[in-house]
Image: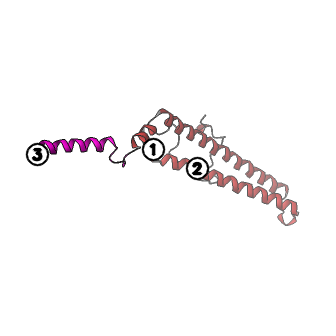
Amino acid sequence: MKPLLLFGMVVLIVAVSSCGCLGFFEGYTEKAQEYTSADYSIGQYKFFIDKYNAIRSVGAMIQNVDSDLEDFKSMHPDSSSWSRTDSNNYEDLRFTRTGYIGQYNSFVQEYNSRMRDLTTNQAWMKPQNFPERLDMFSPGNLITTGNPELSYR
């Protein structure tokens, strides 16, 4: 009786382990291999380079629109005497600035989210020389292409 019970246990263990515990853990090995592969690490690094450079580019666009708004205000100091065209041009600049700020914040949010991601949270997988977290838009704290200490290529 004991040999038959032992044989049954061995068959059960082999059956369960060969089918991946009845399918509950199927695919985890492949995912673990994917997350630890060189291609995945390179892809992560490329994401951070591309996203950081996109943030810098949009930051520069915000600065350009701010400069355009200042120029417009200096050329048209009295807003009560603006023509309809002047008002429309000013509103277009403000609308463009708002769009760039939204895009900037969206990129920063994606960057921060990916940096907090479980798969990037391993010390050996974290992209080196990149900030841990970026701040959302604020006028005095803008990441642009003019910040040489923060440029990555």
Give the residue at the far left of this rendering: 1
Of labels 3 and 2, earlier in sequence is 3
Q: Name the residue that disc number 1 marks.
A: 119
Residue in view at x 37 percent, y 48 percent? 23
The reply to whether callout 3 and callout 2 are in contact (CB within 8 Å) is no
Tell how many labels.
3
Q: Is residue 77 visible?
A: no
Quadrant in which residue 89 is drawn = bottom right
Per the rendered image, the range of residues in magenta is 1-25
The reply to whether callout 1 and callout 2 are in contact (CB within 8 Å) is no
Label 3: how many Cα within 10 Å (few below 14, some 14–19, many 20+): few
Q: Is residue 38 magenta?
A: no
Q: Position of residue 148 (x, y in %)?
A: 62, 37
Disc 1 to disc 2, how far (Cα)? 19 Å
Q: Name the residue that disc number 2 marks.
A: 108
For badge 1, the amino acid type reads Thr
- Dot 2 lies on which element? helix
For badge 3, the amino acid type reads Met
For badge 2, the amino acid type reads Val
Q: Is residue 19 magenta?
A: yes
Of labels 1 and 2, earlier in sequence is 2
